[in-house]
Amino acid sequence: MELTQLEGIGPVRAESLRAMGIYSLRDLLFTLPVRYDDFSVTMPCCTRQEGNIVVSGVVVSEPKLSVFHGLKRVTTTISDESGKMPVCWYNEPWMVNHVHEGDHLKLFGRLSVKNNRRTLQNPRILSDEEKLCPVYKAIKGFPSKSFRKLIRSALEMTDDCCEETLPPDFRLRYRLCELNYAICQAHFPDDMEALKIARRRLAFEQILLYLVYVSMTKSRKESSTPFVFAENVQEKFWSSLSFEPTNAQKKVLDEIAGDLQKNTAMSRMVQGDVGSGKTAVAFGAIFLAKQAGYQSAMMAPTEILARQHFESAKSILEPLGIRCRLLTGSTRARERKEILKQISEKACDAVFGTHALISKDVEYPCLGLVITDEQHRFGVNQRTLLQEKGKNELCSPHVLVMSATPIPRSLALILYGDLDISVIDELPAGRIPVKTRLVPEKKRQDMYLFLRDQVSSGRQAYIVCPLVEDTDSDSDLQSAKSLYENLKNNELKGLRIGLTWGAQRPEEKDRTLMDFSKGKYDVLVSTTVIEVGVNNPNATIMIIENAERYGLSQLHQLRGRVGRGDLESWCFLLSDCSEKLKVLCSTNDGFVISQKDLELRGPGDLIGTRQSGEPGTAFLYGDVKLLDEVTRCVRDLHHDQTLKNACTIIEASASAYFSRSGHAVALN
């Protein structure tokens, strides 16, 4: 149904809705509230609890209209058995005629306490029936009251556009309410229990359809030429290394070898914590590709990380007869021309680089293996473009993606459902865990003294700030530039201090990071730009300003920049004590940390920006048990004969759902 057919929607408002991805009545109904104001709990009029509150009482004084600093102001007082509450409306002069002495009012507003005087500011008058009020994401040209009215109007037509997708016996088995009931209660719930039931149904179905669709596409994998190499050739690779691989590394490379020998293209993700040895596994896959006579391409999100992989490859792969080259955006024209010629003439076996690997003029005659590192830093399209480079009429190249962001397996299945998942859950022997400590402001100077002592021993340190520059809106947050100037002239005067941030010119940023890796700086002040792609074993201190502003997983990634050698390393979190930060101090296990992060913040925050093709998970509110339950449900659908009919219906729904939209609808 066209949006303009709804009452109150003209061309301008329709365009505002389309800008938010709302094109139809169905899209509108699936635009869920971001939160709910709870009007069911009232506070006594004597309360001094600042913030948004609900109070109920009798108006005990006739409202008065006055002008205060140019603002029209209506004031009155309400009272209950506990005491009185002063009330004030700014720039709402009509309230003087709308409210009268003796009226019984239920009000929702913000209580402000200043100079020991309380005022309930600009309260909204509630009806007795109002208990849970939906709050939607702001839409240009749509006051919240108008949008709620539009949703109420749209809900009268749910039967016309929201046909039930799940069979009755299936809903009964998994305790799921009907779709139309879920949609109505998700917008205007009768109570918290009804809201919980409604959102569970919508979340369950969204994940279910996505996973079923993924399992269908998984069964239709693209064909590929099987790699032929000697049995147990992996052992030849491992024995060439100067260190003993972990059992987890061996297991994952064996899984990759099994995929490469199939006639369908491999699509596998390797997950591993910081320092677990993912790069060595990737090099093992490149070695297998070379044994089978194919080229490999490994793409990294930053030039410094691509260069680090290339330098490692020269010491590990070139002695095995694998010819390696580096191709980035800064590669000089003459050298670039030479590298492109070597790739096209099969004189290069493995090429490492950044987005330059997917440039139009790069031609791979026998690209058999595509590897992307730090997968979460790439869009889906970038991974696909590199894969397309190796396609020919008969087959597609094998794809391996790497991620150092530990994700609970249940969530990984949602995010990367089109990929098989391998986990390196073991750290190399001798790895020294990073010691993590909370540092209150009063201990800052002691921390700087410790840093100076480490630098005098030849070590280096990172200091990470949440902002690049000071801003009025976030005056309580530390900025990299101001801290850099302060430390340079005060606490760390005399030390060599570098500065970098994300929007810095790429060549300057790469030069700063490279100089730090070469030991030209003692301390590097930065934003989170150093989260990925900096490998400096000599750095033993990580200081994180305003640590409470980061998620646990990101803090763990930042901590992973130190402790990369055989030296004792430290991570200092500058913040007040909190349960969240205590988790980071108690463990170095990234999977434990990410699980806790998922529970605290929900998958939307953990994942970051949602990419096309991924399900909208922002409203799951960290319900880890639900993720696991739906995963088990999908498994049951394909093995439990009593669910055979349901499986057919759900597969049809999933196919239609994704064919229509191209990706799962984001329930905001």
Image (cartoon, rainbow, N blue to C red):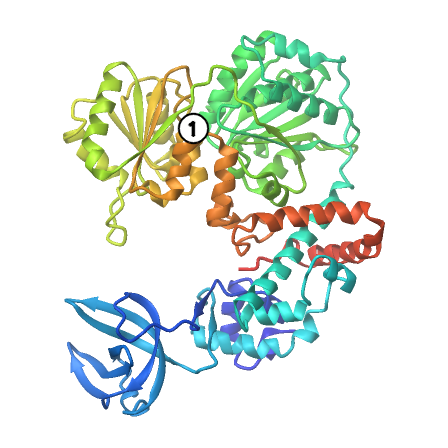
* Residue, far front: 81
Q: What residue type is labelled 1?
A: Gly
In percent of width and height, residue 157 lies at 65, 77
* Camera-nearest residue between 559 and 113: 113
In percent of width and height, residue 135 lies at 46, 68
Asked if 265 appears above or below 196 in the picture, the reply is: above
**Res 614 visible:** no
In percent of width and height, residue 96 lies at 27, 89
* Camera-nearest residue between 78 and 634: 78
Q: In the displayed structure, does residue 599 sit left or right of residue 511?
A: right
**Res 537 visible:** yes
At x 66%, y 26%, the residue is 369
Q: In which quarter of the image is the N terminus?
A: bottom right
At x 84%, y 53%, the residue is 642
In percent of width and height, residue 466 lies at 32, 42
Asked if 377 appears above or below 276 in the picture, the reply is: below
